[in-house]
Image (cartoon, grey):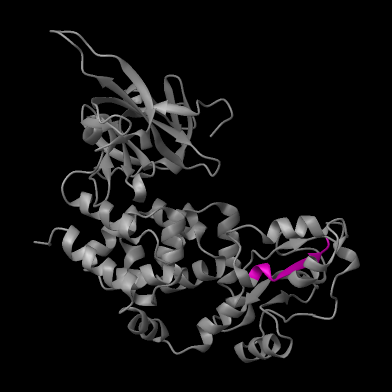
Amino acid sequence: MSGNNITRIFLARLAGTAVFDPNGDPVGKVRDAVATLRSNNQPPRILGLVVEVPLRRRVFVPITRVTSIEAGAVVITGLLNMRRFETRAGEMMVLGDFLDRTVSLVEDGQNVTVEDLGMEQNRNGDWFITRVHVMRKGRGLRRKGATSTVAWEEVSGITHPETHQGVTHLLSTLSTLRPADLASVLHDLAPKRRVEVARALDDERLADVLEEMEEGARVSLMAELEGERAADVLEEMDPDDAADLLREIGEERAQALIELMDPEDAEDLLRLMTYEDYSAGGMMTTEPIVMSADYTVADALAAVRQSEISAALASQVFITRQPLETPTGRYIGMVHYQRLLREPPSTLLGSIVDTATKGVNPNASLNEVSSYLASYNLLSLPVIDANERLLGAVTVDDVLDHLLPENWRHDHRDLTASSAVTSAALQSIDSQLPKEG
């Protein structure tokens, strides 16, 4: 979005706004927005806009295709999919489903009427419904009550009608499960229900779950996601897992999704897909922690402290010449996490770098990689090309994924299915969700 854009948009006011392509030619008018509810009453995620084009046809425009929302104009990029829009399971029309609904204020239980809903963009570029404009009941005939704008979390009773209420309750029940356990629960659901739950998860959560699913299950689930949503989820996955999934879903579908992805993310995946699956290049992630020698111990500790960094990747910081994005400049060595803990925060990484671990080339076999990790007690291993550039890192969990039998996830599910939390989740599915007809 451009820097001049309004950061909060009220959707009832946006309805009727003209939509233009990048050349300034009119495309149609905004009629509604499509959202999906999330667990624990978190603000719903906006998936896209419903735009009415000539001949009164309503089509869907993914929110990722919207480049500008300004007073009196919405600008989109890319080709329009002219297929007539229809909502899918887990989706709702913001204005059609929410406007004029009677809901309650959490603070005092007072019933109010929804008059508008405001969406805001977060730092990652995603849009969420964060505000609800409500009207209280007036006194006397023809008198309107006072209006106010409250946070999404300050109202209750805004749920998707009918079956999707059950999905919302289910998500709340499953919200504390680890991705591997949630993947097990999804595996045991009926296909239709599995898709409903997957569509209601946010991109990051669904990405984590897909990384833990068996090949056949995740391929069939990806086939049910719209292209833009599928591309967003791929961008949230670890690059090596996303590359594996693209190999699994077929060349034509993979190419279509790559074209929808951010060019930088797509470039990483295309590079990974050129390597054999059981080679170091095929197993590596292109996003290890990389710094130059003039960074400090404090800088490195701040990097490994990030919650989204896996334990295996956080165990080493790789030191290279500029550029620091893979493929990097010349690889120098690594600094181990324990060494960071023993040094003063102002220490330069160049003074404590371990230059003995040379890494492997991208064509190294699974046996070579696993032997190297075991021999030197490493949790991750640098992958270096012929020009001594760092291409990525192979972590011990990536190696285990390839060493274990193909059905290891199924065996793991058998071991954990009797646990209290999973059993409770499955009972919740039976009790809360309506049966399929």
Instruction: Residue 109 in the image: state x and y as whole percent.
Output: 25, 31
Identify the residue at the far right of this view: 351
Occupied quadrant, residue 390: bottom right
Residue 27 is inside the magenta segment: no
40 sits to left or right of 395: left
Instruction: Residue 71 in the image: state x and y as whole percent.
Output: 45, 19
Q: Is residue 358 above or below residue 33?
A: below
Instruction: Residue 404 in the image: state x and y as whole percent.
Output: 48, 88
* Residue depicted at 33% across the width and 53% down the height: 200
* Residue depicted at 46% across the width and 73% down the height: 247
Q: What stretch is highlighted in magenta?
A: 313-321
Q: In this view, does 86 lie above or below 264?
A: above
Occupied quadrant, residue 174: bottom left
Instruction: Residue 314 in the image: state x and y as whole percent.
Output: 67, 67
Quadrant of the rendering where the C terminus is positioned? bottom left
- Residue 221 visible in rendering: yes
Residue 319 is inside the magenta segment: yes
* Residue depicted at 61% across the width and 68% down the height: 271
